[in-house]
């Protein structure tokens, strides 16, 4: 099991073992290896080594969902700024070629595993072959994901550099040519990022060579795209539909993470409710290795810069005033030291020791605030591992006496699982020797000498009477689903000490609008293990929730074409009536909207529609988040529980 997925909780493991679940010391069920738990689990090249600008080498990083860094109940959609130029001599060697479809596939898979929904590629027009081919590969990959991942373009002002140095070349006409190509080639894709049926084009310093004729660009470019500019001034830029924040550098203080810039942007965003605003989160910045570098540095401070940017956003948004979307700066800009592909170093190191039956550990560097939880592993060969469960951050010990182990020599490891995108760190192995016992009461069922409860009833082991019982095992113990989807997993029930009887099941601690069922609903267990299938269904947005609502500023995915609903839609900006422009959308929501067509209006004249809930969510949607669902198996007076870790994306 993956340590990040919070499989079987430590308290559950102990409660099952101490309750006398098994009449025998357990055999280690190794499900992972030391190499897997410490090796590269990112899309970065295995050959990529740490750099002096703060970029980590290929690392083992936390895949705890990114949304967990935001306020409770966050449904914020996250995407990352994506660089597309590696593999050519004008850029540093990072171990892969950006336009390789296999690499793009790996990057999208990796991004989705962290909770990202889209890449916005820094694009230089069709004349930049590498970047354009990468965009084509990204388009194909996003389209293959069945509406689960999207892509968009950030038109970089560098696309105009050749025109600027060519006599007689018109910058505005060059921009129109590039943006027309972008619409015809990319923006008609069902996987392209859309807001209310309009494709989104972001701009990165497009006026660097002189102010362009934006009214002419707006009237000439097809597709009626939304133009999104940069920083607080972007809200008032000509032809603007909104703006995005970016990392800013204080050249006099490398430890300044620019809280004042973020505060200003967040405040300005809320002052323009009829426009779109993207928050920005970043780990730091360092362009000392870039050929264009200007020695601009923002220190990462062992992950604190990263956490600070999220904490700052949480001061402005909440479940009652939700943050619609944010952009991570950046996915893979290795040359400016802002890349997140290899993760973020939290500088954590830990040491573990054993005294008697108590395993303890402590941090030798780093801070507890960067750790999500700990996972304890046990092994007989030092390579193949079994998890003994997760331990909450802030707790630094585990009592091994309830682990019901056979006599022998073991290696114990403690893994500090970082908060999202921060590094995971494994302790060195600690030797744990468990001597054989006479079974006079201290051993679990009298078998090994490790402490455990004794039972009463039929059956004996080592002179201790044991009762008929059952043991539960999940496969898998953690699942991840998208809102509206269902997850299935197996629950096996093994009879012990002569147990025979019917076992029934229930679920509790379910998230809102989720349901749990069992097939079959009960098992007759006798002699051998029997299995039931658990189905956990989650609620999705209803059509009614997609209606424009001034009190419901949330992003929603809505699309057209080959994948049906597969594009990005923003509904309910304050004082905005979100009209959907595509025929497919009209067919789907004709019962919810009075008309279809036109463009998004930046107007205060929209007719309010009462939201289905005070948080602006559909009454049937299951909120995104991580949940611990308790499954109970009951047979007469016997009752045991196990926990399913459910991640709703």
Image: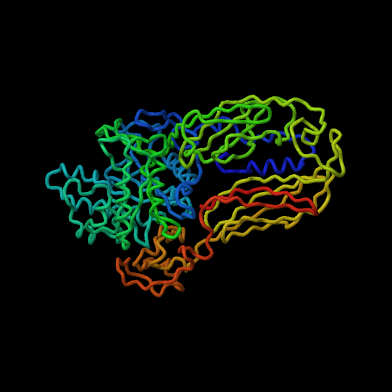
Asked if residue 367 lies left or right of residue 234, the reply is right
Structure colour scheme: rainbow
Q: Position of residue 264 (x, y in %)?
A: 29, 51
Asked if residue 270 lies left or right of residue 509, the reply is left
Residue pushed farthest left? 167
Asked if residue 491 lies left or right of residue 261, the reply is right
Which of the two residues, 237 or 152, is positioned nearer the viewer here?
237
Residue positioned 24% across, 43% down in the render: 158
Above or below 253: residue 310: below
Residue positioned 69% across, 56% down in the render: 506
Residue positioned 78% across, 53% down in the render: 635
Q: Position of residue 380 (x, y in %)?
A: 67, 27
Which of the two residues, 89 or 574, is positioned nearer the viewer here?
574
Q: Position of residue 378 (x, y in %)?
A: 64, 31
Which of the two residues, 99 or 329, is positioned nearer the viewer here?
329
Quarter occupied by the N terminus: top right
């Amino acid at each position: 099991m993956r340590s990040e997925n919070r499989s079987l909780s430590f308290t559950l493991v102990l409660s099952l073992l101490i309750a006398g679940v098994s009449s025998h010391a357990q055999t280690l069920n190794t499900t992972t290896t030391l190499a897997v738990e410490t090796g590269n689990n990112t899309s970065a090249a295995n050959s990529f080594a740490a750099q002096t600008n703060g970029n980590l080498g290929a690392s083992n990083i936390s895949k705890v969902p990114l949304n967990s860094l935001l306020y409770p109940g966050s449904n914020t959609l996250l995407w990352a700024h994506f660089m597309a130029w590696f593999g050519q001599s004008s850029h540093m060697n990072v171990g892969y070629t950006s336009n390789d479809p296999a690499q793009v596939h790996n990057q999208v898979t990796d991004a989705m595993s962290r909770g990202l929904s889209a890449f916005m590629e820094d694009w230089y027009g069709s004349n930049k072959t590498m970047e354009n081919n990468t965009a084509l590969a990204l388009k194909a990959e996003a389209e293959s994901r069945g509406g689960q991942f999207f892509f968009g373009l950030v038109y970089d002002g560098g696309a105009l550099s050749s025109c600027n140095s060519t006599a007689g070349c018109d910058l505005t006409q060059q921009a129109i040519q590039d943006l027309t190509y972008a619409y015809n080639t990319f923006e008609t894709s069902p996987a392209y990022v859309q807001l209310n049926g309009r494709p989104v084009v972001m701009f990165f310093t497009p006026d660097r060579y002189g102010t362009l004729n934006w009214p002419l660009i707006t009237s000439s470019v097809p597709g009626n795209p939304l133009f999104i500019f940069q920083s607080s001034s972007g809200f008032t830029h000509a032809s603007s539909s909104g703006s995005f924040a970016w990392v800013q550098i204080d050249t006099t203080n490398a430890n300044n993470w620019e809280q004042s810039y973020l505060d200003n942007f967040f405040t300005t965003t809320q002052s323009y409710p009829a426009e779109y605003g993207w928050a920005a989160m970043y780990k730091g910045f360092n362009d000392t290795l870039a050929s264009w570098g200007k020695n601009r540095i923002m220190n990462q401070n062992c992950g604190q810069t990263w956490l600070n940017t999220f904490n700052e956003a949480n001061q402005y948004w909440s479940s009652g005033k939700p943050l619609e979307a944010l952009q991570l700066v950046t996915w893979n800009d290795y040359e400016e030291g802002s890349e997140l592909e290899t993760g973020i170093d939290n500088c954590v190191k830990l040491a573990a020791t054993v005294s008697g039956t108590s395993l303890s550990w402590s941090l030798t560097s780093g801070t507890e605030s960067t750790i999500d939880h700990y996972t304890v592993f046990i092994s007989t060969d030092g390579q193949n591992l079994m998890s003994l469960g997760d331990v909450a951050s802030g707790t630094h010990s585990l009592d091994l006496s309830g682990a019901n182990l056979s006599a022998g020599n073991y290696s114990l490891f403690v893994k500090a699982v970082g908060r999202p995108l921060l590094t995971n760190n494994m302790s060195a192995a600690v030797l744990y020797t468990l001597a054989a016992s006479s079974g006079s009461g201290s051993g679990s069922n009298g078998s090994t000498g490790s402490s455990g409860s004794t039972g009463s009833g039929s059956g004996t082991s080592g002179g201790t009477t044991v009762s008929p019982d059952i043991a539960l095992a999940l496969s898998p113990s953690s699942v991840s689903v998208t809102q509206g989807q269902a997850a299935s997993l197996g629950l096996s029930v093994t009879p012990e000490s002569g147990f025979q009887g019917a076992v029934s099941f229930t679920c509790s601690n379910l998230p809102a609008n989720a349901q749990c069922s069992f097939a079959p609903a009960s098992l007759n267990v006798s002699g051998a293990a029997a299995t039931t299938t658990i189905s956990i269904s989650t609620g999705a947005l209803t059509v009614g929730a997609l209606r424009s609502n001034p009190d419901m500023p949330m992003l929603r995915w809505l699309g057209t074409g080959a994948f049906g609903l597969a594009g990005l839609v923003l509904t309910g900006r304050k004082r905005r009536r979100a009209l959907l422009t595509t025929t497919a959308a009209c067919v789907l929501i004709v019962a919810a909207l009075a008309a279809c067509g036109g463009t998004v209006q930046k107007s205060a004249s929209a007719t309010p529609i009462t939201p289905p809930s005070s948080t602006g969510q559909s009454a049937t949607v299951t909120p995104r988040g991580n949940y611990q669902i308790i499954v109970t198996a009951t047979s007469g007076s016997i009752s045991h529980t196990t926990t399913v870790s459910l991640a709703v994306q």
